[in-house]
Image: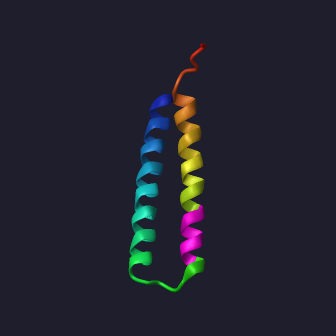
Amino acid sequence: MNEQELRKRLELLRSEHRDLDAAIAALTEAGSTDQLQIARLKKRKLRLKDQISMIEDSLLPDIIA
């Protein structure tokens, strides 16, 4: 992937991460008793965070200290 594709993918992942955050908050505030669904959403959110971190690391140049 080139840099432009990585940046586009990064933005999509960030958007999905925000959406999941909102969904988890809505379920929690509504008093949802479906803890399994909330746990699955949280796991998905963590996977997205890992993917976001990997892309950000590949886009930032290494700095030699």
Q: Which residues are magenta?
A: 37-43
Q: Quadrant of residue 57?
A: top right
- In reply to whether residue 41 is colored magenta, the answer given is yes
The percent coordinates of residue 14 (x first, y second) are: 44, 49
In the image, is residue 23 above or below residue 5?
Answer: below
Q: Quadrant of residue 58?
A: top right
Identify the residue at horizontal 41%, vertical 61% (top origin): 19
Judge by depth and name the residue closer to the eye, 65 or 15.
Answer: 65
The answer to whether residue 14 is left or right of residue 41 is left
Judge by depth and name the residue closer to the eye, 42 or 15.
Answer: 42
Identify the residue at horizontal 58%, vertical 46% (top origin): 51
The answer to whether residue 45 is left or right of residue 29 is right
From the image, which quarter does the C terminus lie in? top right
Q: Residue furthest top?
A: 65
From the image, which quarter does the N terminus lie in? top right
In the image, is residue 56 above or below residue 39?
Answer: above
In the image, is residue 63 above or below residue 27?
Answer: above
